[in-house]
Amino acid sequence: MSIPTHEGHDHRELLKQIAKKAMADYGLWPDFSPSAISEAQQARPADGPGAGAQAAASAERDLRQLLWCSIDNDDSMDLDQLTVSEPQPGGAVRILVAIADVDALVAPGSAIDQHARQNTTSVYTPAEIFPMLPERLSTNLTSLAFGEARPALVADFIVDASGSTGEAAVYRALVVNRAKLAYNSVAAWLEGQGPMPEPVAAVPGMAEQIRAQDEVAQRLRTSRQERGALDFQTIETRTVFDGNSVQDLTEERDNRAHQLIEDFMIAANGATARFLQAQGFPSIRRVVRSPERWDRIVALAEPFGVRLPPAPDSRALAGFLTARRAADPLRFPDLSLSVIKLLGAGEYVVEGPNEVGDGHFGLAVKDYTHSTAPNRRFPDLVTQRLLKAAIARGTVPYASADLDQIAAHCTDMEDEAHKVERLVRKAAAAMLVESQIGRVFDAIVTGAGPKGTWVRIFHPPVEGRVERGFEGLDVGDRLRVRLIHTDPARGFIDFERA
């Protein structure tokens, strides 16, 4: 694909072209079919107009009175989950996670369902989002939008004082989002770095609610870390546009609000898996097996004076990572990325009610499915259909062979979607620096092997390949590099040692 990218061109439009071509190249459908568009236009709210007494009666429980809230990105409209907490005797806390009832408007076998089943996930690129569901659903009718009564499936579980969770109930309910909150402003407030967000202050009791949820999330995180959950830090970037031109790349940093939602979703996904198992239903589990390249992880730790056990041990690896984060925070994101690559990719597998699977090595959990993002991920929509059948004491709505095929396809297509996202991010980075050919940057080596040597410059946080002068370089080395070539259409950024 030949795309001119000299200064003055519309970067946003060029990135859209690159993204659409990449979607097609990797087997993803960039556009909805006319049938899917028609279905979306004809869709009506699952509870009919007003969501009044009739709507409440159609749900198993009416929980609209609770202080539900969402926490997501500032600009997110496809809201999949709400959370609320209630204190219990003995220091325990009851956590409820409401998940949007997407299945209510996406019928199995419909044109919308076929699109979702093919792509299996929403694809997020700097210039354009390719949603798994038409936006009239995902950002409106099936979104847990602020102030709207919506049907949901609720995972209801107790977290004790030690951060352990027990058996869970899952049921249908009607809910209302009382506060639409954003990660960064909530995190700044929780961390004492900013004011209370206005949507929190506007709802009596919401401030106490969020602080209580944060405290429970910290319990859950500590408990998982004690079991060997791995705490990584990688550099994620967000493309900043000035009009239609790429202006900058900013680092997206983890924070307390991200952690709150992450910890609650991990707990809810575990509760969902256990509920399906208890009902005698199969489930699609998210699995990260014990790493086959553990010997390489052991070798990675040796230069730091750490001897990891000869067999995979998540607790030992977690201890090593925690120590390295404290000792060398600058290089820790690159060490994290190396370990993540050596752990291997996650995959979806079907687990029967009487089977014991591999679990998730990185999260240090055995029971883990994906259920909390049905607007964005197809495995979550399938899980929702399994849950609704189990709640109704019906039969499994998928044949075993169909579930196996769905799990394998979701694994494959998730990988393809990530390739699209990486390519377009690299294209945006190449556009950002293409006018700086010849400039010298401080850099750190992020990869060195037979396929090449890679470095990351510090600002903007861009990664590229060292084409000349890479001899003798190894991961973690600091050096200065000169930018010598870019090819935005292919996502190439090339350096030489300065």
Image: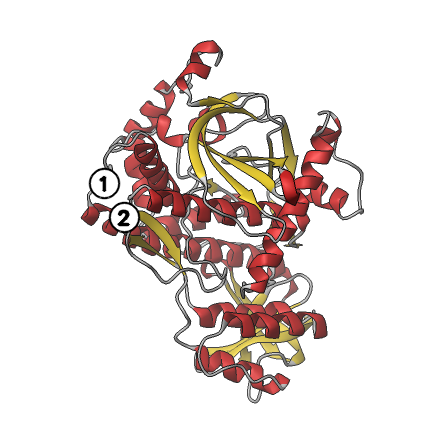
Q: Residue at x 55, y 21 (%)?
A: 64
Residue 94 locus on image (x, y percent) = 57, 38
Of the two numbered discs 1 and 2 in the rendering, the one whose residue sits closer to the viewer: 1
Mark sitting earlier along the chain (1/2): 1
Q: How is the image coloured?
A: secondary structure
In the picture of the structure, the residue carrying the numbered disc 1 is 398
Residue 177 locus on image (x, y percent) = 58, 27
Check the image and name the residue furthest to the front.
90
Residue 382 locus on image (x, y percent) = 33, 40
Q: Residue at x 62, y 79 (%)?
A: 476
Residue 422 locus on image (x, y percent) = 48, 57
Disc 2 element: helix
200 sits left or right of 243 in the view: right
Locate the N terminus by quadrant.
Answer: bottom left
In the picture of the structure, the residue carrying the numbered disc 2 is 406
In the picture shown, does residue 111 fall above or below 260?
A: above
Q: Residues within 10 Å of mark 2 (few under 14, many from 20)?
A: many
Question: 312 or 125: which is nearer to us?
Answer: 312
Locate the C terminus by quadrant.
Answer: bottom right
Check the image and name the residue furthest to the bottom.
472
In the picture shown, does residue 356 fall above or below 446?
A: above
Kind of residue indicated by mark 1: Tyr
Q: Residues within 10 Å of mark 1 (few under 14, many from 20)?
A: some
Question: 321 or 267: which is nearer to us?
Answer: 267
Q: Residue at x 38, y 53 (%)?
A: 414
Question: In which quarter of the view is residue 243 placed?
Answer: top right
Residue 242, can we see it? no
Marks 1 and 2: CB-CB under 8 Å?
A: yes
Find the distance from the CA under tag 1 to the CA under tag 2. Answer: 10 Å
Disc 1 element: loop
Kind of residue indicated by mark 2: Ile
